[in-house]
Amino acid sequence: RFKANKPAMNFLRRITGGGVEHLEQEIDAGKSIMVVAGQGEVERVAALVTFHITREEDERVLAELGSWKDHQPHASCLLPGGKRERKELTGDTMERLLDTKLSFLKGILDVERTESQVEFARSLKYGLPTKYMRAVYFATLQENFQALSCTVADPFTAPVVNTLDSATVSRRSSRRQSFEVDANSLPPWVIVNPVYFVQTAEDSGIFYAWLHPRDLELFMTTSGRKALASWLHALG
């Protein structure tokens, strides 16, 4: 179990914006570790398994655009995948992801090769400098996957829990109204580009879309994330 003395915990609370409890849970699950780098800086290390899936007819790449939870969209452009857990080999993580989060892709992937990648970046969630160690599976699809499809012109219907109380409905409505989006301000291709929603729980799920490689790179930047957030909110 991850342990830290009081000064260390206070330091982590400052730099994670109070998210140290979530970080502890992640470390307890074996999904990341904390190390002290050469200059005494605290560094997070996370091992990931991701899928670089290309659509052969136009070379677009399948991207995870973000999630739907807490009654609103959360933008974060990534390749589909997830963190390795304690004692998992890369192949074990791949199989677990295809049995759970990415079950809509199971049995239709044609994996061509794997590649190891290392990236240093600051975690958006924790604000910590992080070393990402990725095993990337490069693949194509043998057939189209099945998922709910929507566009800005044909909006998304959010999943809801049947037992929502009036206070929760009110909070959800106010959150949605606080982010006003002018669909006309979005690039024309975004208006018609299909977005696929894969439900992961009764009231949550993940958005995916086929993106040109340059747009995938753009949405991973700070300015691109703002545009991506507008896109997801414009879906309804």
Image (cartoon, helix red, strand yellow):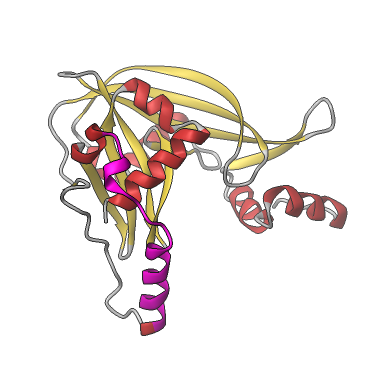
Q: Position of residue 135 (x, y in %)?
A: 46, 25
Query: Residue 148, can we see it?
Result: no
| Magenta stretch secondary structure, dominant | helix
Quadrant in which residue 113 is drawn: top left
Which range of residues does the magenta coloring cover?
Answer: 167-187
Verify whether residue 152 appears in magenta: no
Q: Where is residue 161 in the image (x, y as percent from the top left)?
A: 30, 72
Q: Is residue 37 above or below residue 204?
A: above
Q: Is residue 219 above or below residue 55?
A: below
Quadrant in which residue 110 is drawn: top left
- Residue at 32 percent of width and 41 percent of height: 185
Verify whether residue 178 appears in magenta: yes
In the figure, is residue 151 to the left or right of 62? left
- Residue at 27 percent of width and 56 percent of height: 236
- Residue at 40 percent of width and 59 percent of height: 69
Identify which residue, 208 or 25, lies in the foreground: 208
Identify which residue, 37 or 192, lies in the foreground: 192
In the figure, is residue 89 to the left or right of 154? right
